[in-house]
Amino acid sequence: MNDKQIIAKRVAQELRDGDRVNLGIGLPTLVASFLPPTLKVHFHSENGIMGMSPLPGEGFEDRNLTDAGGRPVGAMPGACAFDSASSFGMIRGGHLDVTVLGGLEVDELGRLANWMIPGKMIPGMGGAMDLVTGARRVIVAMTHNSPGGPKIVGRCTLPITSIRRVDLIVTELAVIQPTEAGLVLLETLGGASVADVVAATGARLILPASLAVHHD
Amino acid sequence: MPAQVKKTISLVHAIEMIPDGASIMVGGFMGGGSPLRLIDELVRQGKSALTLICNDTARPGFATGKLIDAGLVARVITSHIGTNPETQRRMIEGSLVVDLVPQGTLAERIRAGGFGLGGILTPTGVGTVVAEGKQHIEVDGRMFLLETALRADFALINAKRADYQGNIEYALTARNFNPLMALAGRTAIAEAEEIVPVGAISPDAVVTPGVLVHHLVARTNA
């Protein structure tokens, strides 16, 4: 498995039967392909659908049924559609169990930055600020480092997405839980040692006495 | 003509009503549910200095992206421009003012505009750059931002089906901002993929009431 697949597979294990889930564009979208077929998850998309499914096959594309990136998708039996105010009412109102989002930085306070790099990239926040503020559980799925250095840092240098502390960070090296006390290293992934993770991280990590090491 | 029939307007006349410098809300999400014929006609008539309110600027050469490409827009109020490098280029160059608004806040500001509210209180953006210069209001110990209502001179919306009275039904994810904008535009102009007899859309299935749609664009361009 490549790094992104390692991350997506581990995030998939966080989802529970019946969860209402919003997956961000990019890496988080991969999570859906690692879910066991028996697990029933309701996928929400901010453009106004609960019960989104992958496109059932070539030739079924409908420009009135897309994901938030504008790509054609399908719908599960029982799916429903609604306007943008209702869609974000579900997000802000605590009706979404989990959101999985990509990240540029997460800091020791558990704050996520993922919507702009001043002077370089200003895509806009889209639905990210509402999702991080309102979803019951926020999981950040991102590579551990960028070419520029660590993405898990003491304090975010980029504009943050929300002051809300995210619930879990999953990278190709580690599963980290932001807590009131700081960032707790829960597991290592892909055969990484604790020392590897500590060396690759730009923030202080709290190391519990027992720690799970996964080799895939 | 029976009294219950709304007079359609030609695509050309619908867009001729919009003066240079007008504010327009345009429905759609990455082009899904955008009024593509109305957008093309705005470009053909070469409007200028528009204020555009829309979820995103799609891609160059597509949907709301065409309005950016053609240089019709002086200011855009939107949640996402990441898929349109042309919007970003014009913003950096200084020929286009871009106000970025969190998507849920944008939807609620438009809803508030159409519903006669002064604004809404949202936790989204508290403690971020979005909060700068905004009034903070604490309710039950939780901090919210006051986000003011948005209205526009015109709302351009896309419907799956409209009946002869202008009652509107939407399709799946093409609904998005359309019903919110229909009420927030001082003049609402709708284009529909299908126009059907009154009664073909059940009253319970009507999302935007026909009496609130000012103009229904004819299926032909004449």
Image: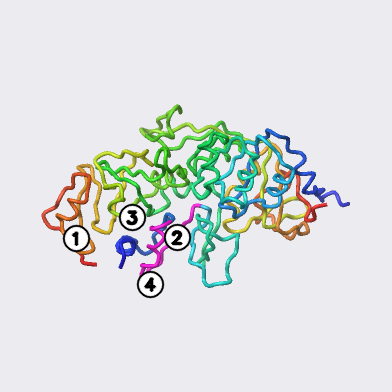
Residue pointed to by mark 4: A38
Helix, strand or loop under label 4: loop
Neighbor class of circle 2 (other Cα within 10 Å; few <14, some 14-19, many 20+) is many
Q: In this view, does A15 lie above or below A124?
A: below
Quick one: label 1 or label 3, which is nearer the N terminus? 3
Q: Residue furthest front?
A: B93
Query: For the residues carrying marks 1 and 3, which lies nearer the camera in this image?
Result: 1
Q: Nearer the viewer, residue A73 or A4?
A: A4
Closer to the camera in the image, A175 or B44? B44
Q: Which of marks 4 and 2 is nearer the N terminus?
A: 4
Q: Mark 1 belongs to which subunit?
A: A
Please provide percent x and percent y for residue A130.
43, 44
Callout 4 touching callout 1 (CB < 8 Å)? no
Q: Name the residue under label 1.
A: A192
Q: What residue type is labelled 2?
A: Phe
Res A143 quadrant in image: bottom left
Residue A23 position (above or below residue A34): above
Mark 1 Cα-neighbour bin, 10 Å: few <14, some 14–19, many ≥20: some
Q: How far apart are marks 4 and 1 (CA)?
A: 30 Å
Residue drawn at (69%, 55%) of the image: B203
Going by the numbered disc 1, the residue's amino acid type is Ala
Inspect the image, locate mark 3, and give the three-letter code of the amino acid beneath it: Ala
The residue that mark 3 highlights is A141
* Image mark 3: chain: A
Question: Could you tell me which chain the residue with mark 4 belongs to?
Answer: A
